[in-house]
Amino acid sequence: MNMIDLRRDTEELERSDRDPDEQAIAATSATAPIAAAGLESRFVSCWFGTNKVLENVSLEMRPREVTALIGPSGCGKSTFLRTLNRMHELVATASLAGEVLLDGVDIYRGGVPVTDIRRRIGMVCQKPNPFPAMTVAENVVSGLRLSGLKVDRDARRALVESCLRRAGLWNEVRNRLGDPGRALSGGQQQRLCIARALAVSPQVLLMDEPCSALDPTSTRRIEETIGELAESVTIVIVTHNMQQAQRVSHRCAFFLAGENEPGRIVEWGTTEKMFAEPDDSRTLDYVRGRFG
């Protein structure tokens, strides 16, 4: 198995390679409805320098389902999540072996530009991070600019409303579209970040503990949004909240790392089975709060 050198092909170079006609075509496809895609990892291992942090992770993440990645801190869940849209390579010392397939095409070797990969596989981070100098509306469409895509003014207005509705935020901010994104509450900021990710019509949405810093009411609203989005988008979520994993996910993958050993998947399956009668006793101990 060959290790991939991840220090290559910057986004700026890819963006400059596109002529205006290509950008227009990309913009049309980015803002049109796109079917959810299947995502699969095959024998993925990750390193930071010489430190191996993940070993042989194989996992199928099915279209229009929510897959929850669970396990104690330090077992590689967030690192694995970042491999799924090539954010792992943003760390200078990072390397990777194995395959990540988006509808059967390896995102590391398939010849698809990294900007397109990160458009098709969006990311919502743990801490809400709206752009502070931008308004609510500008935050929503900022992903189009960063991807080098263009839409006209009328389409932009419609897109802002559509994405905010899908993120469950429109009714709360419809009269505040010109306010700074940072003026919203924490839960609203996180839903704004979801709307921003949706603006480029991703097929997959990755979420790294999206509710960890939120109050119970905001958490409930985000979970409702996840349930609604899963009807059209494939979702992969990292969470330490076992009740949340039960509420929002269709399937779970349990990660675990031994002392001075890389993380790996102990088992994965339907959420119902993983919480009721998993095959490995360590899974049952973890989901019932006996460690971690």
Image (tube, rainbow, N blue to C red):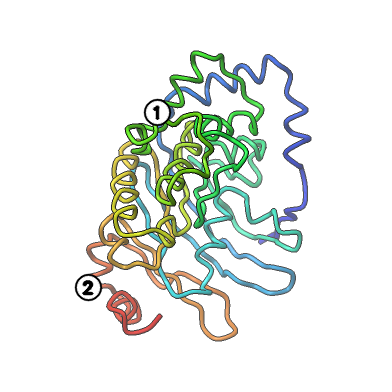
- Image quarter where the C terminus lies is bottom left
Q: Secondary structure at mark 1?
A: loop
Which residue is the site of mark 2? 277
Taking 121 as reference, is 144 above or below it?
above
The image quarter in which residue 268 lies: bottom left
Looking at this view, is 209 or 171 the one in front? Answer: 171
Residue 241 in percent (x, y) is at: 35, 67
Q: Residues within 10 Å of mark 1 (few under 14, many from 20)?
A: few
Looking at this view, is 102 or 272 the one in front? Answer: 272
Q: Nearer the viewer, mark 1 or mark 2?
A: 1
The reply to whether discs 1 and 2 touch (Cβ–Cβ < 8 Å) is no
Residue 214 in percent (x, y) is at: 39, 58
Give the amino acid type for the residue marked by disc 2 in the picture.
Answer: Glu
- Is 290 placed left or right of 102 in the picture? left
Q: Residue at x 58, y 33 (%)?
A: 142
Looking at this view, is 247 or 131 the one in front? Answer: 131
Q: Secondary structure at mark 2?
A: loop
Q: Residue at x 48, y 61 (%)?
A: 58
Taking 169 as reference, is 210 above or below it?
below
Taking 232 as reference, is 240 above or below it?
below
Give the amino acid type for the residue marked by disc 1 in the picture.
Answer: Asn
The image quarter in which residue 262 lies: bottom right
Q: Report the Cα–Cα distance between label 1 and label 2.
A: 49 Å
Q: Residues within 10 Å of mark 2 (few under 14, many from 20)?
A: few
Residue 252 in percent (x, y) is at: 35, 62
- Is 76 placed left or right of 292 in the picture? right
Q: Residue at x 47, y 49 (%)?
A: 206
Residue 178 in percent (x, y) is at: 51, 29
Which residue is the site of mark 1? 175
